[in-house]
Image: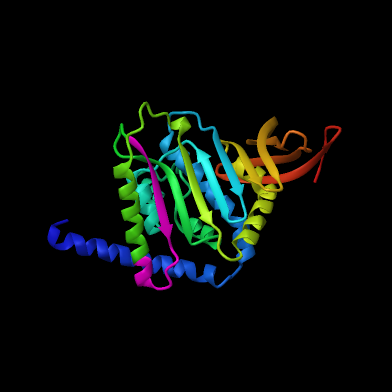
């Protein structure tokens, strides 16, 4: 892009992104289905974390640990491993799924490594706050990694204010990367990503709903995303550590029925699930197991 048109091209792109963000924020700000969205948003964050590891750690083990912390004024979603590439940062700020490009370049007959990252699903998390602080590791080139911080502000109430938020986000991450020193002897397994939501009015109660839903959906997330090793949750009055193990597999026609055990903490009762799937489709059912008999 020449200098004559390059500046205007960036302006047009930011305006298009701001318009899209404005439309996606509208139902969230209107409180439409807010309790349903609260139950969905942790799933969206877990999916993004899973996609991050899938993209960045193709040739390594994928033992992903998700760590969620809730305080009176913050909701923090963190996970180990993974890093942000240039296109990931741009996708995050401008609200498009950076996996779209990856999908178009892969064999259409194969299931994509990513489900979707920082697209429409990520917008649901703004139910908690339109001010999000992101901390992580940025891949400057094939061999250089730097820690960075990005302030994502989507509190603007018109398109021009949202454009300013996009511009400030790019400025904040560029400044952070430029001032950060390269990580010596980088070990991706030790990298950490954090999304810090500064809770808005009503955000705490909605975050509590999201945390409660985690108890119901953790098993489904971990069965569908086997690269997740554990999901941890901490708040001032509760603490949970979800871990999943495969108990047995039973052949069934052209597939198999797999029995899983979900443990919530060390001293709490286990929950059991059976899963049967063909291709990309799974049916998962919670069950009770009594004397080797299964009950729905």
Q: Is residue 295 visible?
A: yes
- Is residue 91 magenta-colored? no
**Front residue (pair 125, 273):** 125
Side of 225 relative to 209 (left or right): left
| Rendered image quadrant of residue 157 | bottom left
Image position of 260 with respect to 118: above or below:
above
Residue name at image x 18 percent, y 59 percent: 6
Farthest residue, direction top: 185
> Whole-percent x and y of residue 253?
67, 36
Q: Residue at x 66, y 36 (%)?
A: 243
Give the residue at the far right of this rendering: 291
Count the marks. 0
Residue 60's x, y, as percent?
46, 28
- In the image, which residues are magenta? 145-163
Q: How far across and down, in percent of the image, does residue 248 sit?
A: 71, 30
Quarter of the figure with residue 275:
top right
Residue 208 at x, y percent in the picture: 66, 56
Scheme by which the image is coloured: rainbow
Please say if 282 is above or below 1: above
Q: Quadrant of the rendered structure where residue 264 is?
A: top right
Q: Describe residue 37's horizontal placement relative to residue 49 as left or right.
A: right
Q: Residue at x 53, y 47 (%)?
A: 47
In reply to whether residue 157 is colored magenta, the answer given is yes
| Residue 223 makes an appearance in the image | no
Q: Is residue 187 above or below residue 154?
A: above
In the picture, which quadrant includes the N terminus? bottom left
Q: Nearer the viewer, residue 225 or 215?
A: 215
Q: Residue at x 58, y 66 (%)?
A: 201
């Amino acid at each position: 892009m020449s200098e004559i048109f390059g500046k205007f091209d960036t302006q047009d792109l930011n305006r298009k992104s701001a318009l899209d963000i404005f439309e996606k924020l509208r139902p969230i700000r209107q409180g439409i289905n807010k309790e349903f969205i609260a139950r969905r948003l942790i799933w969206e964050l877990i999916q993004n974390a899973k996609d991050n590891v899938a993209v960045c750690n193709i040739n390594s083990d994928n033992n992903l640990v998700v760590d969620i912390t809730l305080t009176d004024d913050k909701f923090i979603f963190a996970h180990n491993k993974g890093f942000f590439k240039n296109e990931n940062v741009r996708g995050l700020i401008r609200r498009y799924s950076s996996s779209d490009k990856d999908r178009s370049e892969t064999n259409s007959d194969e299931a994509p490594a990513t489900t979707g990252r920082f697209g429409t699903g990520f917008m649901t998390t703004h139910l908690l706050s339109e001010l999000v602080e992101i901390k992580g590791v940025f891949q400057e080139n094939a061999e250089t990694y730097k820690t960075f911080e990005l302030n994502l502000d989507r509190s603007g109430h018109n398109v021009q204010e949202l454009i300013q938020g996009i511009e400030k986000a790019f400025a904040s991450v560029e400044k952070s990367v430029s001032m950060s020193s390269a990580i010596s002897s980088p070990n991706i397994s030790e990298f950490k990503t954090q999304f810090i939501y500064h809770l808005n009015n009503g955000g705490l109660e909605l975050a509590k709903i999201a945390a409660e839903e985690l108890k119901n959906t953790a098993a489904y997330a971990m069965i569908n995303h086997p690269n997740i090793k554990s999901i941890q949750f901490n708040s001032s009055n509760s603490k949970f550590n979800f871990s999943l193990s495969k108990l047995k597999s039973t052949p069934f026609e052209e597939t198999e029925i797999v029995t899983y055990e979900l443990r919530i903490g060390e001293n709490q009762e286990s929950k059991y699930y059976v899963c049967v799937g063909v291709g990309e489709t799974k049916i998962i059912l919670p069950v009770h197991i009594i004397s080797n008999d299964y009950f729905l």
